[in-house]
Image (spheres, rainbow, N blue to C red):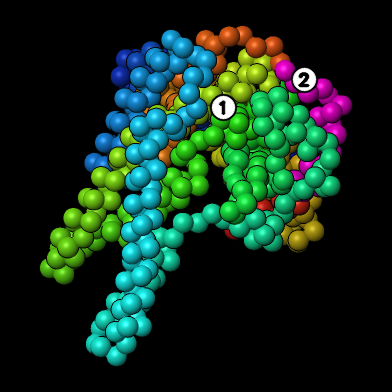
Amino acid sequence: MTETIKQAEEDRGAQARERDCPTCGQRVPVDRRFVVWCDACEWNVDPGGEQETDPDGGRVERLRRAVAQRHGERLFADLALQPASASPPGTGVSGVVAVALAVAVHGLTVVLAALGLWLLIGRWGEGFQPAIGALLLGLAVLLRPRFGSFTKLRQDAPVLERADAPHLFALLDEVAAAVGTKGVEAVVLGPEANAGVRTYGIRRHRVLRLGLSLWSILDRQERIALLGHEFGHYAHGDTRHGLLVGSALRSLSTWRYVLAPNGGDSLMDLFANLLTALPRWTVHGVTLLLDQATLRASQRAEYLADASAARAAGTDGAAGLMDRLLVMDSAEAALQRETVAARTRIGGPSRGEDREERADGLWERVAAQVASVPQREYERLRRVSELRGHSVDDTHPPTHLRRRHVAQSDHHTPGIVLDASREAAVDGELRQPAQAMARQIVRDGLGA
Ligand SMILES: [Zn+2]
Ligand SMILES: [Zn+2]
């Protein structure tokens, strides 16, 4: 009953009303679920664009973005000229520079730890020195390279292993083989509209993280494309996500956090900010250098991973995936809405059992909402991608360039076709853990 009322409400909201564009006067449709914008003059095409850069370190972020943009455009032009992969990413001079910088970053952590230990133990009882030593040791602990622990991962999150989902793992193995690598040892499900591969621990256990908001909005070949892309990262290697450089980038972002200037304007604050200015700018400088040395390689790795996606799923599947990536935010917003709706149904009893019922079908409802996103919204997001261009935090090149690259490269027929019965078998294996996650989200909220 409530479903029908909600649906009717949504239909009414989706009914296109119109208004005048305040800039050029053209009539633009109003759909309260989406940003109202003008396709003639691009009024309000990207209302969130200004908040993207954070006010502190805004200058550095702008600089990093500009560097990314320049690299990105040149790289796209180069790839258009010679799409075949020549040398693996991360080799050559920039690869050596990246490794040297990463070693220097971790070297400093070692020095801090040693100095801290010496002050703490060697200078015990000598005024403030042991306290400073303890502080330095704590800092070194914060800055230490983290490789993640596979054992801890298995304790913390519901992890699927081969025996839990034989059809899923068979599919993963097949996609991995199609792009020239081996499969993963575990799959971790998450609520987000994203996916990624990581390796855990020194022994480099391969783990695929699959966000259900993304997985549930993809059609069959798009799913193959997503897996092809992720396994493509393993196949081609990616320095930025590699052990040494990846952990150095994490250390640097810890440094930036520790050295961030105080907001206050008391004399003490100003003095402290002055004192940290030199190290702060050094950290910014090293970050910029490491970006320079790795961005090209990591963006190149994304294009190569997209090529893997096209090889596994076919060009159409890969292009379809790129379109879905445009609405990832819509998928997360839909999840948010559905979660809130299930948690706080107006007038309904909030007994635990009832809530559990409302959690069932959560992912299907998210998929249905995303399926109703109109072409006009896709077009707006495509233009936003072009306007924002390359950002740094997200090492993926802008989606419109990725889509263009896939479309411009050699046309691939699907290497793997996921048929309906096989999809049903995989879905059947995911149903129970997906439902468990939905119930957990509805019980605890998305923030938990
Ligand atoms: Zn206009
Ligand atoms: Zn990627």
Q: Which is nearer the eye, 185 or 3?
A: 185
Residue 45 left/right relative to 432:
left
Q: Quadrant of residue 36?
A: top left
Up/down of 401 relative to 185, above or below: above
Tag 1 secondary structure: helix
Task: Write down the residue under mark 2.
Answer: 417
Residue 380 position within the rendered picture, expressed as x and y whole percent measured from the top left: 46, 22
10 Å crowding of disc 1: few (<14), some (14-19), many (20+): many
Residue 65 position within the rendered picture, expressed as x and y whole percent measured from the top left: 32, 33
Give the mark toward the camera: 1 or 2: 1
10 Å crowding of disc 2: few (<14), some (14-19), many (20+): some
Disc 1 to disc 2, how far (Cα)? 19 Å
Task: Write down the residue under mark 1.
Answer: 305
Q: Which is nearer the eye, 189 or 86?
A: 86
Q: Quadrant of residue 254?
A: bottom left
Up/down of 292 relative to 163, above or below: above
Q: From where the camera sits, is residue 367 visible?
A: no
Up/down of 302 relative to 286, above or below: above
Tell which circle, 1 or 2, labels the residue nearer the N-terminal end: 1
Judge: label 1 CB < 8 Å from ligand 2.
Answer: yes
Q: Magenta stretch: residue 163 in it? A: no
Q: Quadrant of residue 373?
A: top right
Residue 24 position within the rendered picture, expressed as x and y whole percent measured from the top left: 32, 15
Residue extending furthest bottom?
125
Q: Main secondary structure of the magenta part?
A: helix
Tag 2 secondary structure: loop
Please give the range of residues in magenta.
415-434
Disc count in the image? 2
- Residue lying at 60% horizontally and 35% vertically, measured from the top left: 234
Which quadrant is the N terminus positioned in? top right
Q: From where the camera sits, is residue 420 visible?
A: yes
Q: Amino acid at mark 1?
A: Ala
